[in-house]
Each structure stands twice: as structure tokens, then as C-alpha cells.
Image (tube, coloured by chain):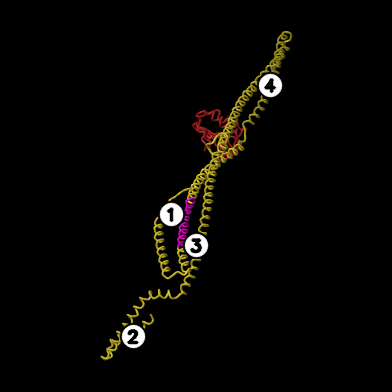
Chain colours: A red, B yellow
Amino acid sequence: MSIDVKKSEDGKLVTINVGESFDFAHHKEFRDCYRHEAVTSQFVINMSEAKYLDSSALGMLLMLRKYAGGDDASIILQSVPDEAKQVLEIANFHKLFDIK
Amino acid sequence: MKKLYVPLILIGALILLEIIGLDQKWRWLCEALTLLSAFYLIYHYRNITQKPELSNEVVSDDVNPQEMDADLLIEVCGVLSKEIININDDTNRVKQLISQAIVELAGGFNSISDITKRQDNLISDVIEKTGEDSSGTSINIQQFTKETSALMEEFVGILISVSEQSVETAHHIDDMVEHLDSIFELLEDSKSIADQTNLLALNAAIEAARAGELGRGFAVVADEVRSLSARSTSFNEQIKSRVGDANTAISYVNNTVNGMASRDLDITIKAKERVDSTLSAVQGMNVYFSDKIGEISNVEKELDHAIGVAVRSLQFEDICRQALEAIEKSAVRLEEMNQILNDINRGTENGMSQISLKNTMNLAIKNIRKSKLKWGSESNKAVLQQSMDSGEVDLF
């Protein structure tokens, strides 16, 4: 399953749907979704299908955050399943990202 | 006294007859008889009041009643003596029993008090050892759990940091691969240039051959160009193979980075959950301990109070002793009375005269009255405690 990306009309909102396997094998794909966008864009990562997260997923999200300006980044992790939420909690990601 | 019934009935009947009303001569008879009966009654009453004097004189003439009195006195004195001895023996025994019991009870209560104090100290020591504020060599579970939890968080942080750097490395590798790919493309262009050059040189050689003698110089140039393009092509191949090697090396790096980046966090999550639940359990235990210590403290206060009540109640010994001493005093008085009776008894045995017996008895009566006065004043001086509640508290 691959990662797809949608961009809003005014180009300021970027929605990335990560699909079922959000892991290291897809790291280049994920990067390609955002590397040509403006760093000031608002990013929404749809994680509704991501049942399993390992540390590489966390690494990828952190790289996105770095790209988008670190503390200035505007990233929303949307529709996070409960198991994935556990992983995010243990990594203290609720301090770094907007988790919904 | 039975003798009086007759005259009384007679008077009653006569008065009745008077009231009924009879002839003159019968009335005279009734009144005469009434008077006679009245005189008889008066005479009889005077006899009764004079009787004591009569009995004294009877005693001096009659010996048997005196002997009977003597036997009675001996019996009574004997019984009194025996019972007085019994009373003294029993009161002594009771006094001893109470004294002994008091000593043992007091000892027992003091022991209980000491033991509870020791218990209190032991519990305090245990609490200190496992308490929240203790440090150093003592066993502090809560401290340990907190440190473990913090350690786990640090560990997770390191894992994630490694992952982040791994992904970053992967990105750099991707960039490198892109650069290498672009080199490949350039090499392709270079190859096509070389190929084209080769073709051109070939054409040139053909044209040179066609020109004959004049084209011989040109043919040499064309040959050189061809060999140059061949060398260029071979360099291309070498560069391609080097780039291929680089790509292979990079793919190994990619695998390594892949391994570094992808760590299963499941075990860590479970471990952290266990540590967190242990921590909250330990905190729960601390609250439980605090509550129980509070309860133990209350129980010990109650125990102290109960021991105090028990020790106070041992004061019954005083009351009992006083009561027993009062009994002993009464026994002594009974003994005095017994002595007086004995004296009288001895007097009658030796055959005292009537007058000296009377004197002895009068003396006895005087002595008894003197003793009674003495006892009366003694009773006023003694202050007897009637019950436990009326006394003051005296803790041993």
C-alpha cells in the first residue's frame, strides 16, 4: 500500500494519507510528499489505517517536523488508532504534534 | 391473763342489761356486780406490776434454773470463740490472697505497657526503613520505581533519537543515490557522444580512403579520433562500474540504516506500562501504610487508656483491706463480749452469792456500755471508702 498526497486549492494545506504500512520501506515516498512543498504549509497526516507504528515511523514524522520548521511546524496527526496512540504517548509525541 | 376474760365479759353483760332497762331491784344487783368485777380487775393489775420483785425471790430459792443458765452460757461462749477464730482466719486468708493477686496483676499490666511500647518502636523502625523520605542504604521501593520509570523514558527517547537520525541518514543516502543516478545519465550522454564520435571517425576514414593519396593524412587523424573515442567509451564503462560499486555499497548502508531505524517499540511499551503500574501500586501501598499507621496509633492510645483503667481499678485492694480491717475490729469486739460472758460464766460456776452475781452482772453491763461508747467514737474517726468511684486516682 502506498502513500498518497492531496493538496488544497490555495496550496497551503497538504494532506498525506499514510495507508496501512507506515514503515521504513516507504520513507522515500513519504519524503517525496512534502519535500517540494512550502515549509509554512499546514500538514495533515491521515493515520486512520496505520495500525502498527515502529520507531522508523516516529523518525519519519520527526524529519517532516524538522523540514516544516521544528517548533514552528504546523502538523496534525489525524484519526490515530488506539494502538498507534500508545506508541505516540510513550514517545511523548503529544508534546510535539497535534494528535487527534 | 385468761382469768380477766370472765370479769370483763361479766361487766359487758351487766352494762348491756342496764341499758336494756330492768326493774329497780335487778338494776341494783347489776350495779353491785359491776362494781365487784371492777375491784377484782384493779386488784389483778396491781399483781402484774409487782411480779419482777417476786421473780428475784424465786431465783434465790430455786437452784436448777441457775445451772441451766450456766450450761447455756458455756455453749454460747464456745460457739462464739470458735466462730471468732474462723472469722480471723478467713479475713487473714482473704487479705493474703488479695495482696498476692494485686502484686501479680500490677506486674502483668506493667509488662503489657512495656511490650506495647516496644511494639510501637518496632513499627516505627519498619516504617522509617521503607518510607518515602528515607535515603542512602535503606530499601526505598518508591524511589527505585521512580528512577526506573525515568530510566525507561530516557531509553525510549534514545531509541527515537536514533530512529530520527537513521531516517535523516536515509534521506542523505537517497540524495547521494540521486546524484549518482544523475552521474549515470551524464555517462549515458557521454557514451552516446563517444559512439557518435566513433561513427564520425569511421565516416571520416571512409572519405579519406576515397580521397586516395591526398586523404592519407586525414585517414590517420580519423584513426586517432576513433581510438580516442574507444578509450572514452572504455573510461565510461569503468566509471559506470565504479558508480555501480558505489550503488551496491549504498544499498548495504541502506539495509543497515533500515535496521537502525525500525525498532519494535512493543516490548518497550509493555515494560513501561509495567513500571508505571508498579509505581502506582507502590504509591497506593504508601497511602495504605499511612492509614494503617494512623489506626495503629489510635489502637495504642486506646490500649494505654484501657491499661490505665485496669491499673486504677487495682485500687480496690485499699477498699477491701479497709473492709477486712473493719471485720477484724468487729471480731475483736466480739471477743471482748465473749470475755465478759466467760467472766459471768466463771462466776456462776464457782457458786457466787446472789448479791455478788448481781454485782458481777451490773459490772458487766457497765463494761458493755463503756465499750459501746468507745466503739462509737472510733467509728466516727474511721473514714471508710464505700466504692471505687468516691476515691481519688492513684497510679502506681
Task: Say which of marks 1 and 4 sits in front.
Answer: 1
Task: Say which of marks 4 and 2 sits in front.
Answer: 2
- Circle 3 crowding by C-alpha within 10 Å: few under 14, some 14–19, many from 20: some
Find disc 1 in the rendering and name its residue: B389
From the viewer's side, name the closer residue of B128 and B357: B357
Residue B334 in the magenta stretch? The answer is yes
**Residue at the spot x=65%, y=29% of the render?**
B256
Query: What's the residue type where badge 2 is placed?
Result: Leu
Residue B154 in the magenta stretch? The answer is no
Find disc 3 in the rendering and name its residue: B84
Numbered label attached to residue B242: 4
Find disc 2 in the rendering and name its residue: B10
Query: What's the residue type where badge 1 is placed?
Result: Asp
**Helix, strand or loop at disc 3?**
helix
**Helix, strand or loop at disc 1?**
loop
Gap in Å between the C-alphas at discs 2 and 3? 58 Å
Q: Position of residue B112 (x, y in %)?
A: 53, 48
Chain where mark 3 sits: B
Closer to the chain start, of discs 1 and 4, is 4
Q: Is A21 left or right of B109, judged from the image as shown? A: right
Residue B70 at least partly seen: yes
Residues behind callouts 1 and 2 on a single chain: yes
Q: Position of residue B23 (x, y in %)?
A: 26, 91
Q: Is B51 left or right of B288, judged from the image as shown? A: left
